[in-house]
Amino acid sequence: MPTVVDDVQLWCIERGQVYEQHSLIMVGESRIQLGIDSQVIRDRLPHHNVVQLALDGRNPIATLIDLCEDPKVDGTVLCSLNTQMIMNRQSWQAQREYVQRFRDGLSVNTWMNRQMATFVQARCSFRNPQVSLKRILASVARDGKLPRPAYVTTRSDRSRVADYSLTDTRKLTPDWVTNGISPDTSQIDVSEVRAFVQAVETLRPAVEALKRRGGQVVFIRMPTSAERFRIEEQRWPRVQFWNQIAELTGAAAVHFGDHAALAAFDCPDSSHLDGADAPAFTEALIATMHQNGLLSPLDTDVVASSNTAIPRGQ
């Protein structure tokens, strides 16, 4: 299966696409990179320019702030966040090196080489590092058989597809989810809630800057398995944490748990959607956003099917 090597140069090229009209810019970690099907958005929202800037395992706040403070950006930023990301302020700069690389700029030679590499990698399996001759020979020598296909592939637009039938999801699911016991049994106290409020409030100036240019930020809590969410909810109750984001930032906030259509999906590894479910989830998210006025009125071909209101800040 062909897959594109997702490196900082590819990210920078994608970052350069945010200046087109009606851009829908996805920011976050792996959940939104795997859970949103970019092609479905393009098919359903033909007037939107879809940009995928999520980075696996990296807190997205640095990219979020950079986009909001960029005077030429006026689109919609769909930012996948959870309470833990906000509370862990030490990780807020995790995507800073990518942001800085874009600011430094790519040389014409680097840009052209990356574009050509993407074209070939997206079409030719022999360019997939997972099927290199070295890896094949090592697998045959070690196991007496060819290596299993990678369960995650990357498209040329940086969106990803996971096929969890190709892997053992038990090895991907954290022990604390399997055992039903949170790794953090601390009790919530007033100081933590205060720290959360202070952290979220620091995002408001950036959100308001984008709004003044006609853009918007929509925070989204992507689906997780029922057991994982139950454990996380015990540690970080929504009523004290997530539910304050819209009011404190002035942005809209979509939580999968508030919408039956978004909560109807299983996460095989407890944390991410399977590629087979991503198109339907994307359709449901489009309908939810459209129903709540979060998409351009140019996209009159979208059929809204959600009747649940989305919290919005003032």
Image: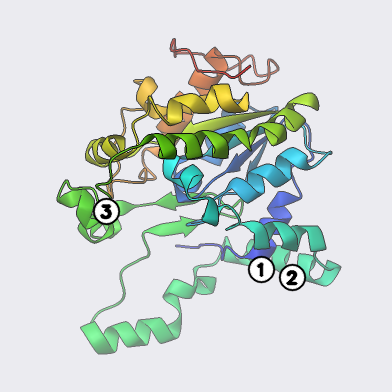
Q: CA distance from mark 2 to mark 1?
A: 6 Å
What residue lies at 51% left-to-right and 62% top-to-bottom? 3
Where is the C terminus found, in terms of image quarters? top right
Residue occupied by mark 2: 113
How many residues crowd mark 2 within 10 Å: few (<14), some (14–19), many (20+)? few
Q: Are marks 2 and 1 in contact (CB under 8 Å)?
A: yes
Q: Position of residue 286 (x, y in %)?
A: 52, 24
Q: Position of residue 16 (x, y in %)?
A: 76, 50
Q: Position of residue 284 (x, y in %)?
A: 44, 24
Badge 1 amino acid: Ala
Front in this rendered view, residue 65 or 271: 65
How many residues crowd mark 1 within 10 Å: few (<14), some (14–19), many (20+)? some
How many marks the image carries: the answer is 3
As drawn, 304 above or below 199: above
Between discs 2 and 3, the one toward the N terminus:
2
What residue lies at 64% left-to-right and 14% top-to-bottom? 300
Residue occupied by mark 1: 117
The local secondary structure at tag 3 comes to helix
